[in-house]
């Protein structure tokens, strides 16, 4: 679809074709040769093809760099074939001595980086004029296709995506705040980012597979990756220290913070108020990145400007007043998620059973419904959450498999309900006491 690969993206793909010579690549000969020397020293005997797979550099470009290294008595061929890709190299004494010094300074061995200047330029082209967006209706429908109900919240999140505006999403636990916010990665246009960036001989890791989902179409230059707009989320573990770019000596790279990983997408600060630090202290750290769309990181003491063009999403189960008004102005939209209806939670339960490929009859769904409908209607009046629907479906499947049965039954569902901690607690305590236990973590009275 053109929305995910528009004219600007097509032009970027033309710019980011695979470089086949030193004239076509942004890296210097020295940077490439130092990387190759560390690779050869680490692997002992290694073919050019293997070096290509590790570094992502074209065979012709590797030949242009390896031949002079042979002449300088750093490496030597141990075997070869008709094709240069099959040639095998090993390190020589002079090369080993140099490699040891290089590894002490920078132990990174892996995919070749892009230069800082190239990273900044390509990002600037993509971010400039990104908002407001015109999002096709089919993109909106596809993004929210598995979201049950929530018509008003979906409308607000769509408007947040169109304008690039931050929002506050709040409501009781288990109402789908994280799940719904994650859908914005499909509403926003994709972005091309470098896997690694080189700055003054140091490597900054940009791509994080935990948060960055790759698109099917990819540029020719393997050092760049096209991803869905990022959805980066942090929870109660967040601290001001984790909002900084820190050096990882085991990998030999500077690992970027969530502020940088979210560039071009959405940064969700989940469970605000559950962190050890005051939520306003954490949000104060975001003021400059939010206002300037850029942040400053320090690489061996040297300041480096990086892009932080993200939509902030703030989420909490607590009162919205835990956040200062100044921070709410940076997330001006708000979405309150109501407790789902019995119809909605049954639909989500059904979808989870279907996704798990479970065989069941309608009586299983009706028994599940009775857990959440009023007692006057023959139910248990428990408070429904979408998390219940997912977890109970999975627990029920595990029980069915343990029993060795072929089909989901009401009896199996009953056992799953008994085993679910929150269902069990709601059955045991009054609604008021249950809410206090969950929200405050207090010890219940017997």
Image (tube, rainbow, N blue to C red):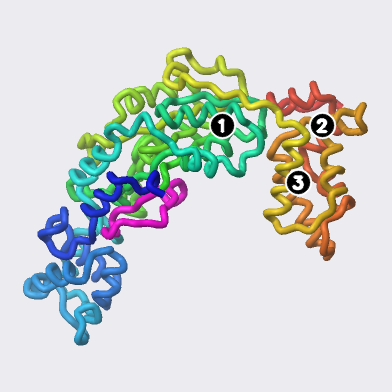
Question: Which numbered disc flags the more N-terminal residue, 1 or 2?
Answer: 1
Can you see residue 94?
no
Question: Which numbered disc flags the more N-terminal residue, 1 or 3?
Answer: 1
Label of residue 382 in the image: 2
Q: Please say if the residues under marks 3 and 2 sit with CB atoms less than 8 Å apart.
A: no
Magenta stretch prevailing secondary structure: loop
Structural crowding at the residue carrying mark 2, measured as other residues with C-alpha within 10 Å and reported as few (<14), some (14–19) or many (≥20): many
Helix, strand or loop at label 3? It is helix
Q: Quadrant of the C terminus?
A: top right
* Residue designated by label 3: 392
- Residue that sits furthest to the left in the current view: 71
Magenta segment includes 30: no
Helix, strand or loop at label 2? It is loop
Magenta segment includes 213: yes
Q: Position of residue 170 (x, y in %)?
A: 59, 25
The foreground one among 5 and 147 is: 5
Q: Select label 1 or label 2 by which is in front.
A: 1
Q: Please say if the residues under marks 1 and 2 sit with CB atoms less than 8 Å apart.
A: no
Q: Residue at x 33, y 46 (%)?
A: 6
The foreground one among 266 and 96 is: 266
Structural crowding at the residue carrying mark 3, measured as other residues with C-alpha within 10 Å and reported as few (<14), some (14–19) or many (≥20): many
Query: What residue range appears in magenta?
Result: 207-227
C-alpha distance separating marks 1 and 2: 26 Å
C-alpha distance separating marks 1 and 3: 26 Å
In the image, taking residue 410 as reference, residue 15 lies left or right, namely: left
Structural crowding at the residue carrying mark 1, measured as other residues with C-alpha within 10 Å and reported as few (<14), some (14–19) or many (≥20): many
Q: Residue at x 86, y 28 (%)?
A: 374
Rendered view: 109 above or below 372: below
Question: Which numbered disc flags the more N-terminal residue, 3 or 2?
Answer: 2
* Residue designated by label 1: 154
Q: Residue at x 42, y 53 (%)?
A: 214
């Amino acid at each position: 679809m053109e929305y995910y690969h528009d004219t600007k993206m097509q032009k970027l793909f033309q710019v980011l074709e695979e470089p086949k010579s030193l004239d076509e690549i942004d890296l210097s000969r020295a940077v490439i040769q130092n990387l190759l020397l560390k690779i050869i020293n680490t692997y002992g005997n290694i073919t050019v093809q293997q070096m290509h797979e590790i570094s992502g550099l074209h065979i012709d470009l590797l030949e242009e760099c390896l031949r002079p290294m042979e002449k300088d008595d750093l490496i030597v061929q141990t075997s070869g074939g008709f094709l240069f890709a099959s040639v095998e190299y090993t390190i020589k004494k002079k090369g080993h001595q140099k490699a040891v010094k290089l590894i002490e300074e920078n132990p990174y061995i892996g995919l070749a980086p892009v230069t800082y200047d190239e990273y900044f330029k390509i990002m600037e082209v993509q971010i400039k004029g990104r908002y407001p967006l015109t999002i096709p209706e089919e993109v909106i429908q596809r993004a929210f296709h598995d979201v049950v109900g929530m018509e008003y919240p979906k409308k607000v999140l769509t408007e947040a995506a169109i304008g690039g505006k931050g929002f506050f999403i709040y409501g009781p636990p288990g109402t789908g705040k994280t799940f719904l916010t994650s859908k914005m990665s499909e509403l926003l246009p994709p972005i091309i980012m470098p896997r690694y960036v080189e700055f003054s001989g140091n490597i900054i890791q940009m791509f994080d597979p935990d948060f960055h989902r790759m698109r099917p179409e990819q540029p020719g230059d393997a050092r760049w990756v096209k991803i869905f707009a990022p959805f980066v989320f942090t929870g109660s573990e967040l601290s001001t220290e984790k909002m900084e770019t820190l050096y990882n000596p085991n990998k030999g790279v500077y690992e970027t913070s969530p502020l940088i990983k979210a560039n071009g997408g959405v940064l969700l600060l989940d469970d605000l108020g559950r962190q050890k630090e005051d939520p306003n202290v954490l949000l104060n750290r975001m003021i400059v990145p939010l206002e300037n769309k850029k942040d400053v990181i320090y690489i061996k003491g040297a300041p480096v400007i990086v892009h932080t063009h993200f939509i902030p999403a703030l989420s909490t189960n607590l009162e919205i007043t835990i956040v200062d008004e100044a921070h709410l102005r940076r997330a001006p939209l708000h979405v309150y998620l109501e407790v789902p209806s019995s119809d909605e939670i049954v639909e989500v339960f059904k979808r989870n059973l279907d996704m798990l490929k479970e065989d069941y009859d309608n009586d299983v769904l009706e028994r599940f419904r009775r857990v959440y409908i009023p007692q006057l209607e023959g139910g248990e009046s428990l408070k429904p959450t979408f998390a219940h629907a997912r977890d109970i479906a999975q627990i029920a499947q595990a029980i069915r498999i343990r029993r060795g049965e072929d089909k989901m039954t009401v009896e199996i569902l009953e056992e799953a309900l008994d085993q679910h901690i929150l269902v069990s607690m709601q059955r045991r305590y009054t609604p008021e006491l249950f809410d206090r236990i969950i929200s405050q973590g207090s010890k219940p009275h017997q």
